[in-house]
Amino acid sequence: MVVEPATAQLPPRGLILISGPSRGGKSSWAEHLAQGWTGPVDYLATGPSSGSDPSWSERVQAHQRRRPGHWRCREVGGQLVDDLRATAPGKTPALRLIDSLGTWVAWHLEDTTPQWQNRCDQLVEALAQQEGPVLLVVEETGWGVVPPTAIGGLFRDRLGALQQTLMQHCHTAWLVVAGRALNLSVLGHPVPLSH
């Protein structure tokens, strides 16, 4: 089945979350949405580019093969906020595709709680200042067993809380499961945040 680029889904600016479980198709859906953008596309990779893990290297290479050659790719790692702030405005606003929030969270697990909150505030501010749309790929965690380690629990809690915060600033949100994309902005209802 051929799916045409979803150009109608892209606003001229604003945050679009694409979340889902591992291997569910969220990165492919984000790339599909980005192909409908007529201006420049900046692909911001937050994960390590290579390493001793052959499985990770294979996934990175698969992502690289899928991307159109004219997209600009920057490996920003944990410096996502700095990269978003440093991007000079162009004549035509660029679409930013960030893949992914989970690997960015992982870079900062040693932050204290106040440091982490400050970092999250900076991310929200930097995303809001972008002149074009931002596609942000987000891993879903916590759908299965409770993580057996403290660091695994911290990762799950920080990623989940940050995702809920970002959802408040979203233009659109997608849930991608088993190769199917569901528009949560149309199908879902906001859950009141506890204070």
Image (spheres, rainbow, N blue to C red):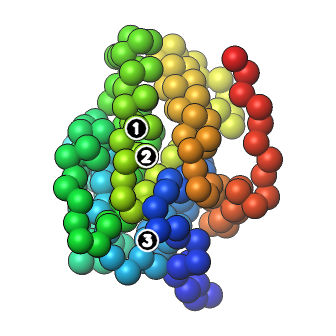
Local crowd at mark 1 within 10 Å, few (<14), some, or many (≥20)? some
Label 2 belongs to which residue? 128
Name the mark nearer the viewer: 3 or 1: 1
Amino acid residing under circle 1: Glu
Residue at the location (65% across, 23% down)?
146
Give yes or no for contact between labels 1 and 2 (Cβ–Cβ under 8 Å). yes
Q: Nearer the viewer, residue 92 or 159?
A: 92
Dot 2: element = helix
Q: Nearer the viewer, residue 147 or 94?
A: 94
Q: Is residue 108 left or right of residue 69?
A: right
Label 3 belongs to which residue? 34
Residue 175 seen in render: yes
Name the mark nearer the viewer: 3 or 2: 2
Amino acid residing under circle 2: Ala
Residue 50 seen in render: no
Q: How far apart, in angstroms, are the residues tagged by discs 1 and 2? A: 5 Å
| Location of residue 153 with respect to 185 vertically, above or below | above
Q: How far apart, in angstroms, are the residues tagged by discs 3 and 1? A: 22 Å
Q: How far apart, in angstroms, are the residues tagged by discs 3 and 2? A: 18 Å
